[in-house]
Amino acid sequence: MKKTITALIFFLVAYQANAMDASTEVLQIENAAFKDKPVFCEEDILDIKRNDFRLINYELMSSESGERFALISIKNTASGQRILRKENLVAIFADCTSVYPQEIEQTLAADETLTKTIYFGKNKFPIIKITTGN
């Protein structure tokens, strides 16, 4: 009887661990080795919509399941209000592919700085750089 109960408890714990969805995973901060350096494939990335945003700083984060995020601080350098859209940011992955982030639309006043977590989807390769094209 004890073996049956122990086996049942073990099964339930294992099932619960596998049933956890990705939203409960812990994000790990990654090293952004190319933050201030050029990447050899940077010319081949997706087109970045011309903009007045300056990327002040960012930290890269990922989950064990391959979800990729960036905590960014970005500034509107224009003298008027601008809208930050997904086409204003691109993530470059270690295999030299690039993607826009998940849909974003954030209004920034003139000279306003925004700090926000941005989702770049799932990828087996880590993000090595975020760019605004400026």
Image (spheres, rainbow, N blue to C red):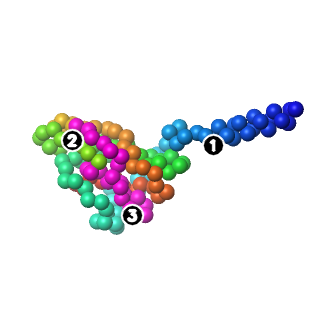
The amino acid type found where label 2 is placed reads Ile
Residue 104 % position (x, y) = 30, 42
Residue located beneath label 1 in the image: 18
Q: Which residue is mark 3?
A: 96
Q: Residue at x 26, y 38 (%)?
A: 106
Instruction: Tell whether 32 sits left or right of 48.
Output: right
Q: Quadrant of residue 9?
A: top right
Report the residue at 39% width, 45% height from top.
Answer: 119
Q: Where does the image place residue 79, in percent across and percent down from the top left? A: 11, 41
Q: In the picture, which quadrant includes the C terminus?
A: bottom left
The dot on residue 83 is 2
Q: Under tag 2, what secondary structure?
A: strand
Front residue (pair 40, 26): 26
Highlighted magenta segment, given as a residue range: 87-107
Disc 1 packing (10 Å; few <14; some 14–19; many ≥20): few
Disc 1 marks a residue whose amino acid type is Asn
